[in-house]
Amino acid sequence: MASVRAVLIDIDGVLTVSWEPLPGTVAALRELREAGLGVALVTNTTSRTRASIASALARAGFPVSAQDILTAPAATAAYLADRWPGARCTLLNSGDIAEDLAGVTLVGAEAEGVDVVLLGGAGPEFGYAELNRVFGHLQRGARLVAMHRNLYWRTDDGLQLDAGAFLAGLEKAARTEAEVTGKPSPAFFEAALSPLGVGAGEALMVGDDIESDVLAAQRAGLTGVLVKTGKYLPQTHRAASGTPHHVIGSFADLPGLLRSAQ
């Protein structure tokens, strides 16, 4: 902990819920900035672009810009450019994220010759007809690329189903396995650390999802910090595949955790 030079931070459920700041999170992030730590906000959110997220957070008082944010859609665009340049992709997602998918060739779900099915975040768009269409493309040989495997997230109305619940069914039905580009992919954490100029051993990952945020980061060499806000559930914590390095009540407690390690 004493060697920490940068902090990766999940947004939804850690800094905010339904884009409203959780108590003490704005002040805590400002304290990290003032301490000279590198900061990157890393999110599987697929309902907003980086610019839109930065604008919402800045209005709430968080000292961030779009350059501080890595989204699963932005990571997906980089992944496709590297692995499948020029591929014809059909996107199933809730929200307009085209700006963060620059360079990706998007076609409608009714199009023929689809090379890649992109699965983003779940919402009303995930009806039977839409899921059945992408299932058809998968049967015809299209690859399945998922921006994340999140099963649910927390809003003001409680826990809501996310794309991971549908992804599991598509994988089983189509007898395929998705390539995941957001958390918990190791490449996602590497992409977040690279602009900060630090190695995994010099960074913390703070999240409310014990598997995709915290334990995935620990497997990638980062120090994991689980917060008991957002989607955190005691039963999920107890049943997890591993043990977080640190558990704190909320992100507001992080500066104190760091100070205690000095």
Image (spheres, grey):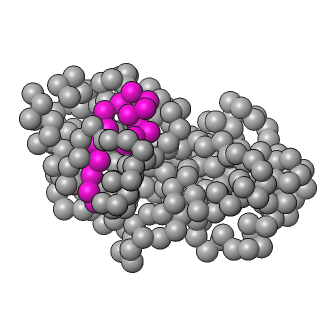
The answer to whether 187 appears left or right of 144 in the picture is left
Residue 18 visible here: yes
Would you say 56 lies left or right of 80 here?
left
Q: Is residue 259 left or right of residue 184?
A: left
Q: Is residue 224 magenta?
A: yes
Name the image quarter holding the C terminus. Answer: top left
In the displayed orientation, state which residue is furthest to the front: 239
Residue 109 falls in which quadrant of the image?
bottom right
Residue lying furthest bottom in this view? 157
Which residue is found at the position 38% from the left and 74% from the top? 158
Please provide percent x and percent y for residue 240.
Answer: 39, 49
Q: Quadrant of residue 223?
A: top left
Residue 200 image position (x, y, % from top left)? 37, 25
Residue situated in front as seen by the camera: 203 or 211:
211
| Residue at 51% across, 60% down | 151
- Residue drawn at the location 79% of the way across and 54% of the way down: 174
Quadrant of image for the N terminus: top left
Residue 108 seen: no
The stretch drawn in magenta includes residue 234 = no
Name the spot of residue 149 as percent of width and height, x first: 55, 52
Q: Which residues are magenta?
A: 214-229
Q: Between residues 125 and 100, which one lies in front from this camera angle?
A: 125
